[in-house]
Amino acid sequence: MNAPVPKPWIMDIAPYVPGRSTTDDGRKVVKLSSNENPLGTPAGARAAFAAAADSLERYPDASGSIVREALAAVHGLDPARIIYGNGSDEVLHLAAGAFAGPGDEVIFVRYGFAVYEIAARRTGATPVIAPDRDYATDVDAILACVTERTRVVFVANPNNPTGTYAARAEIARLHAALPATVLLVLDHAYAEYIDGDHDDGGMALAATAANVLVTRTFSKMYGLAAERIGWGYGAAPIVDAMHRIRLPFSMTIAGQHAAVAALADHGWVERCRRENAELRRWFSDEIASLGNAGLRAIPSQANFVLVVFEGALTAEAAYKGLMDEGYIVRWLPGQKLPQALRITIGTAEETRGVAAALRRLVGRAG
Ligand code: PMP
């Protein structure tokens, strides 16, 4: 029977697997699998979301002007150079869609964010995977992958699922060595979680270079994952090309108002960053104390920690054991990480609980 035939590169895509929120037997337990904010959403953003219920019959503002103006004011940006989308996921797709196609190559690191491969393949481009350096982004390995077919390089900083951070000098070196025709996408989904005032220099590059796009999101620190508000900043011609293929009404009215209200909560970022950093340090130390059992925490600058299992307790057994104890974390064999679990930093109680559960599992496996 004749039937429509999908493009072969579409059928090569392995569908994205989201973090789970229930156990195999349907129990709702502590969800530490999607790097969401355990402190929730700023109160003002929740109120703005609720108020939007009065205008549901109207299309949202397609130009996202209130969001762009608020972002421009907070970050000192040109509002005309802000692209936005249904989460930064859409913005990543727009970058690949506008700059890559069949015959082109798109580079990202081996243990990188899963959407890069999907976004690259969707355009018909060939994904090129750069090796890591002990789970971290290796600038030299990325540069070694560059060919005359390279169109886009995706780097998440901090990276997901490893939590690793490439310092400003490394990002500068990467940008300086890339051909001017290659779009460097610096994915800052977790940038608010970086310790102190560290800054990888991405925004300054996006403001001045012709080939850099920084992407950001309201899903993580701002606690608005449900509303799907992401954005990006880059040179005007880059943003202009992306606008041509974005969905006309990609940001909902409620999401736009909630995002603006979240930005207005001045203490929020500082408070969430501090709480996360303290718990992340404590949790990483706990894992280090299980080093004899082969557990290792990869140094993280994000709101999660990648724990590598190199002893008697395997990551798979720990994943199942934690689920039995009421904690859902992320096991990523599909991303070629069967030896590791990515664990979101939750509330203090959740973080202590998952660490204690891991300690019990190690004890039983030993
Ligand atoms: N980039 C990275 C590195 C991520 O981990 C995520 C969320 N999983 C995203 C982008 C996309 O987030 P959102 O679409 O919610 O903005």
Image: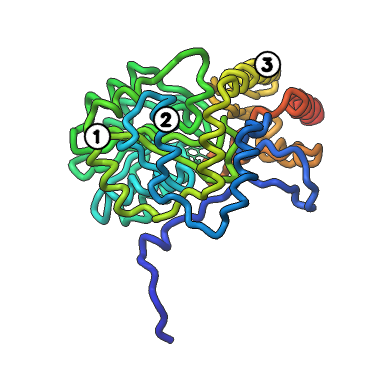
SS label for mark 3: helix
Q: Which mark is residue 282?
A: 3
Q: Name the one closer to the observer, 152 or 297.
A: 152
Could you tell me residue 70's position as x and y percent? 44, 32
The residue tagged 1 is 211
Question: Residue visible at 68% across and 29% down?
Answer: 39
Q: Is residue 323 above or below residue 173?
A: below
Q: Nearer the viewer, mark 2 or mark 1?
A: 1
The quadrant of the picture occupied by the N terminus is bottom left
**Residue tagged 2:** 132
x%, y% of residue 345?
A: 65, 27
**Quarter of the figure with residue 44:** top right
Q: CA distance from mark 2 to mark 1?
A: 24 Å
The C terminus lies in quadrant: top right
Residue that protrudes farthest toward the top in the picture = 196
C-alpha separation, residue under disc 3 versus residue under disc 2? 26 Å
Q: Residues within 10 Å of mark 3 (few under 14, many from 20)?
A: some
